[in-house]
Image (spheres, grey):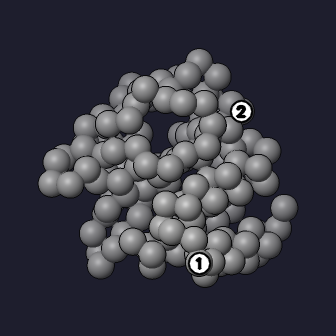
Amino acid sequence: MEITVLQNYIDTIIASKQTKEEKLQAICNYLESKISYYDWVGFYFKNGDKNELKLAQFTGEPTEHTIIPFGKGICGQVAVSNKNFVVQDVTEQDNYISCGWKVKSEIVIPIFVDGENIGQIDIDSHTANTFTKDDEILLEYVCNKVATIL
């Protein structure tokens, strides 16, 4: 699917009259349904003043990783590095938290509000070596739009 079509629909969700939580859930559902290799889509946000992330809205199999300490796993590393993290093969990562045996690759993009990393979108795929620059572009766009409603 063309990236601009996806971006336009994200704009529609953000502009809707739904609550923030409903918008985040709608984004998860939309991305998971439209991109065949997005098998788990979720948002993690900084948990108050703690150096940890807390799971918010997501689509896909339930995960036991509802709290992730900064620095641990891909999500925890992004919370510290403030940089995108694309993992094409999770078996090659020492500092990886497995969310399920089916997960082969993962992409995590931070969300910034007023220059502060306040959360991230996390995508797991059951396909290895699947993420491209277009995924980064799309997910950065999503994060920038989400930042406007937080």
Mark 1, other Cα within 10 Å: few <14 / some 14–19 / many ≥20: few
Left or right: 126 as drawn, with respect to 96: right
Q: How many marks?
A: 2
The residue wearing badge 1 is: 17
Rendered position, 97 above or below 66: above
Rendered position, 33 above or below 135: above
Left or right: 12 as drawn, with respect to 93: right
| Label 1 to label 2: alpha-carbon separation | 35 Å
Residue 38 on image: x %, y %: 69, 44
| Residue sitting at the far left | 49
The residue wearing badge 2 is: 127
Q: Which amino acid type is marked by label 2?
A: Thr
Q: Could you say which quadrant of the image residue 23 lies in?
A: bottom right
Residue 97 on image: x %, y %: 41, 27
Residue 35 on image: x %, y %: 76, 51
- Mark 1 / mark 2, whichever is N-terminal: 1
* Residue sitting at x 54%, y 30%: 62
Left or right: 30 as drawn, with respect to 78: right
